[in-house]
Amino acid sequence: MEKNGEAIRGRQSNSKPSTYIVGGEDGWDLAIDMQSWARGKKFHAVFKYDDQRFDVAVVNKEGHDSCSVNEGAKVFDSGYDKIRLAFGPNYFIDSAPDVCAAGMKMAINATAPPSLI
């Protein structure tokens, strides 16, 4: 059982969602200043999965650690969900406790690029 966290996608303010090639035209390369490239972009995690078997719940740390959907959690079940990452830790689980306990959970820490000064 595997939930597929697809490529990072993003959206620029007041525009349609965009798919970014990390690093731009040159891609993932040491020649690119990745902090500068990432600045100003808003990123999403894209979850692609069998909606008859799985879902994605955005939970708090306690929900992640205990494989439980906490009050106020958002559950997605379309099979292809684009979820905007909040600044700081983001926690995702499958809402079925046995599926989550089998490994269908993850945490993503979205941080601001470090200051270049």
Image (tube, grey):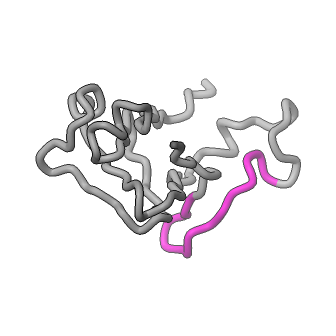
- Image spot of residue 63 (x, y percent): 23, 34
Q: Quadrant of residue 115?
A: top right
Whether 63 is drawn above or below 57: the answer is: above
Image side of residue 49 versus residue 76, left or right: right
Q: In front here: 24 or 9?
A: 9
Question: Which residue does the image show at 51% across and 51% down from the upper left?
Answer: 45
Q: Quadrant of residue 37?
A: top right
- Image spot of residue 3 (x, y percent): 51, 47
Q: In front here: 108 or 112?
A: 108
Q: Quadrant of residue 75?
A: bottom left
The answer to whether residue 15 is magenta is yes
Question: Which residue does the image show at 41% across and 64% down from the upper left?
Answer: 52
Q: Quadrant of the C terminus?
A: top right
Image side of residue 48 versus residue 22, left or right: left
The answer to whether residue 22 is magenta is yes
- Image spot of residue 62 (x, y percent): 21, 29
> Extreme left residue here?
71
Over which residues does the magenta segment extend? 10-24
Whether 76 is drawn above or below 22: the answer is: below
Image side of residue 45 versus residue 9, left or right: left
Q: In front here: 99 or 78?
A: 99
Question: Which residue does the image show at 40% across and 32% down from the upper left?
Answer: 102
Dominant SS of magenta comes to: loop
Image side of residue 67 versus residue 81, left or right: left
